[in-house]
Image: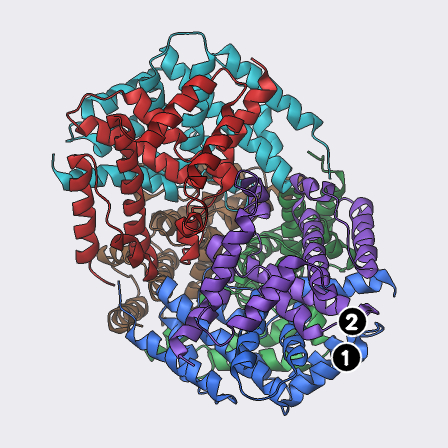
Chain colours: A purple, B blue, C green, D brown, E cyan, F red
Amino acid sequence: MEVSRIIELLMHGNQLKRTARTGWGQRGVPLPENVAAHSYGVAYVALILAQLSERELDLAAVLAMAILHDLPEGTTTDIPPAVWRYLPKGAKAAAEWQVMEQIAGDTPLEPRVMGWWGELRQNESAEAQLVHDADKLDQYLQALVYEQQTGNRQLAEFWQRPYRFHFPEAQAIYDEIERRRTTAPRV
Amino acid sequence: MEVSRIIELLMHGNQLKRTARTGWGQRGVPLPENVAAHSYGVAYVALILAQLSERELDLAAVLAMAILHDLPEGTTTDIPPAVWRYLPKGAKAAAEWQVMEQIAGDTPLEPRVMGWWGELRQNESAEAQLVHDADKLDQYLQALVYEQQTGNRQLAEFWQRPYRFHFPEAQAIYDEIERRRTTAPRV
Amino acid sequence: MEVSRIIELLMHGNQLKRTARTGWGQRGVPLPENVAAHSYGVAYVALILAQLSERELDLAAVLAMAILHDLPEGTTTDIPPAVWRYLPKGAKAAAEWQVMEQIAGDTPLEPRVMGWWGELRQNESAEAQLVHDADKLDQYLQALVYEQQTGNRQLAEFWQRPYRFHFPEAQAIYDEIERRRTTAPRV
Amino acid sequence: MEVSRIIELLMHGNQLKRTARTGWGQRGVPLPENVAAHSYGVAYVALILAQLSERELDLAAVLAMAILHDLPEGTTTDIPPAVWRYLPKGAKAAAEWQVMEQIAGDTPLEPRVMGWWGELRQNESAEAQLVHDADKLDQYLQALVYEQQTGNRQLAEFWQRPYRFHFPEAQAIYDEIERRRTTAPRV
Amino acid sequence: MEVSRIIELLMHGNQLKRTARTGWGQRGVPLPENVAAHSYGVAYVALILAQLSERELDLAAVLAMAILHDLPEGTTTDIPPAVWRYLPKGAKAAAEWQVMEQIAGDTPLEPRVMGWWGELRQNESAEAQLVHDADKLDQYLQALVYEQQTGNRQLAEFWQRPYRFHFPEAQAIYDEIERRRTTAPRV
Amino acid sequence: MEVSRIIELLMHGNQLKRTARTGWGQRGVPLPENVAAHSYGVAYVALILAQLSERELDLAAVLAMAILHDLPEGTTTDIPPAVWRYLPKGAKAAAEWQVMEQIAGDTPLEPRVMGWWGELRQNESAEAQLVHDADKLDQYLQALVYEQQTGNRQLAEFWQRPYRFHFPEAQAIYDEIERRRTTAPRV
């Protein structure tokens, strides 16, 4: 183990603390959460979801994928979907793959990290699908909190994009979040 | 599963995004990281450490404990050590235990969550010890980053408290972080 | 007078500028006021109240107690009420007393400072009661301002806790603040 | 007492929480203190100084003047000295006097508030001079803290303007602050 | 060309990045825009307006005046209108003129810069009038954005001051902005 | 002129006020400037440079290009160079071109706006080259200011990338900025 290389690897995770979630900032949320805080949210939601589900799940893989799922953004930043639309198809996946290899390459962790990354991108295993559900749930929870705490009307856009959850428990949670949003009292 | 109760449970994790790490703020770090971002750091460092160690580890338990390790602070806030000194011995552990029971109680997750919490507090399993090492490593990494990025001289205090790492890999990483700190060039 | 000790004493007051008012931050107020700004508000409100009241009051004691009333929070931080509930009865008062002694001890100011602190905690003198009224009024004024300026719906919680003012002038001011809150026009 | 007018009066004090200290911001201090927090600092320092001094002082007047000393800035903002230089001599004092009358006028507090304001501006009483010393001490304490916590080199300008303290205790404190500044270790 | 003098000149523009727009901050907008960002907005709006207008315009003069129109505020800060009311008539124009001469004096740019400044202050040329229209449009656009993104009710004051636009295109844009403001859906 | 379309166009410029300059944030500058403030800096520097140069220049074109030079970033955000390296050659220019067409398309301004954009991208005219020089000078000025005001050591990276200025006046200014950086006194 070459320690210097490991510290570099650790710094890539630390960098997420300085990487803003772009969608909130573009809509004027003051001091929006960073990618590290969001990734925490995803890992926490995934941990809860995995306990609630009746399916047999590899919890270590679920949590590892949740922790890694936005790791390249320390390098790429959280580029908004509007941009990728202007780039060649597949450019995002290819760029992120290269960044992940640059991050984990030449370390003893490369095989496992890239394995989790591939599984997450493929989104076929139950574990990967649960992480994607958790990713969305953390976003909707946060949108609800921002709406109630900042009075921002432009966040309404976030609720217009339909998303089909893989896990019925995630869907039920989303439905309740959405219900709370529309019935919350006003000041 | 009563969905409302689950959303309450999820909101406790979300609350960490609004809970500042007190030690940085008390020393004037502008916009210091919150507990969610720190907890992400701990989980990420723990994931790396677990891969590097030659010991056989239950990775799911490691990551779950890392994700839960500061969860009560959404309720208690990150009370500085100086305060607990003025309170009866054991008051901190007792209060946090009650908060955790309030968070997870009456949900299907209670047994596992409280199990992980107890294991972490006892700090006897290799998994719990690795999480404690990761907790410290994230703090030292962050202190180094803040020192290099803000010129804050009062963070020097953080390096004076000795901590004995359980894992030799963690100790080696700390030694290198500490070496970088003292040899970094000045502007 | 040993100057070094006095500077230490002064720094305890200065520290309130880096100590956030926890309740606002927990409910998502961006960049919430710190304890120094709040303490200013309390001293200012107390100064006004003391002029309005027909009771004979020791103004110096009123203002000194207002200035000192949250001084320990530079050390303890502004621990939310939810936490003290989990601690032994009297733990808060005991801890704050010790912090105040640590702050003022071994200085020529100790007797007077601790005298004011004791008077404030006992809350029996008219002066102490006026400071408590001012403490609450500053909080309600601030809650109104935050609600009107941030659209935060979660601050509604602050208005649900009944508080009985000692001074009729304070009660009348509160009633008007509360009236403004419910009749303010919306954008 | 017309309550509406009193609330307006209270809001002028509350406004200081939204009024930045200009000198720090112009030199790039991130999120610099506001005038309320500074005024708290002045009142706290004045309270300490008054205890330390052997002179007989009207403590109520000292604290009242400290609390009021920057009150007009809620309306005028903290206009930097460089501006007043371009305005007719006496313009600052005249403008602030009018603002104070607008703030306190038509309230039962007008005589006393304007009395304190006049005493402070005249700066002949020991009480007024002590408040001016406290104003400066809070500024130097804050400059020291910002220098140690932000690495800002441009704050050096603050130490070049000579100020002659009225109270020997204030001078002794300044000398020690200045000594600490020049001997503090670097990271 | 003496380079040191030119860098000083450049720093005056750079200083606008550290100069807050006072009106927003006084009404509690968190992290309000600075004068540099506002001046960008004015220049951008002026560029668009100049293209839309059928009048023949000196575009270089329009853009130069837009870029310079708040330059003295790096020195004076953005003093609110309420203050100038308390100062002798003409004091604002006189002070700003002196600041501009201090900024541009003794540089080869003095004649042109002061020429643009004089033209802008006189507000008789079509170019100057267009810059004033752009100044107002940027303010109203920003007020609309802040209202929609922060739920701030106190910004309503901004819409009560009538302003008569010089260019019909500017008036038409204002009318539409105002219409959007009153018909925007609520969360 | 369809007013709704024009307001959309104006909002694209306004959006730069909510678009952070990524490089500063990635290196931990607290509350780094946004693209609007930077674009103001570029326009201001370009205005000065154009006056200093002996070459005959179309000032309107210089300023228009400076104002437009980062306009697409309201949509794309300020994607760091490290990302484009992972994307197909030419992807950046192609994406930005499409964004600009989306911004200005179907408005009477399209021909001129796209003309300036094309001229800027081609970077062959003296006017376009001056804007590029101004872009770099604003960045170096800002790096110097941040280094002096925050003590950030990681900004040293910015000074290692050589850039060859087109205008000798710009080069002379850079040389002096660089000299100041290395000779500035420390606190």
Q: Which chain is indicated by disc 1? A: B
Q: Are marks 1 and 2 in contact (CB under 8 Å)?
A: yes
The residue type indicated by label 2 comes to Gln
The answer to whether one can see residue D101 in this image is: no
| Above or below for B14 versus B47 | above
Residue B112 is labelled as 1
Q: Is residue C123 left or right of residue D162?
A: right
Residue A51 is labelled as 2
Closer to the camera, C144 or E147? E147
Percent position of residue F133, x then y: 26, 37
Helix, strand or loop for disc 2: helix
Q: Quadrant of the C terminus of chain D?
A: bottom left
Direction top: furthest residue: E55
Percent position of residue F103, x then y: 52, 27
Q: Are marks 1 and 2 on the same chain?
A: no
The answer to whether one can see residue E119 in this image is: yes
Q: Is residue D59 left or right of residue E99?
A: right
Residue C157 is labelled as none
The residue type indicated by label 1 comes to Arg
Direction bottom: furthest residue: B124
Q: CA distance from mark 1 to mark 2?
A: 9 Å
Mark 2: give few (<14), some (14-19) or many (20+) Cα within 10 Å.
Answer: some
| Above or below for E95 versus F24 | above
Q: Is residue B165 left or right of residue C155?
A: left
Closer to the camera, D101 or C181? C181
Q: Quadrant of residue B21?
A: bottom right
Percent position of residue B130, x then y: 57, 84
Mark 1: give few (<14), some (14-19) or many (20+) Cα within 10 Å.
Answer: some
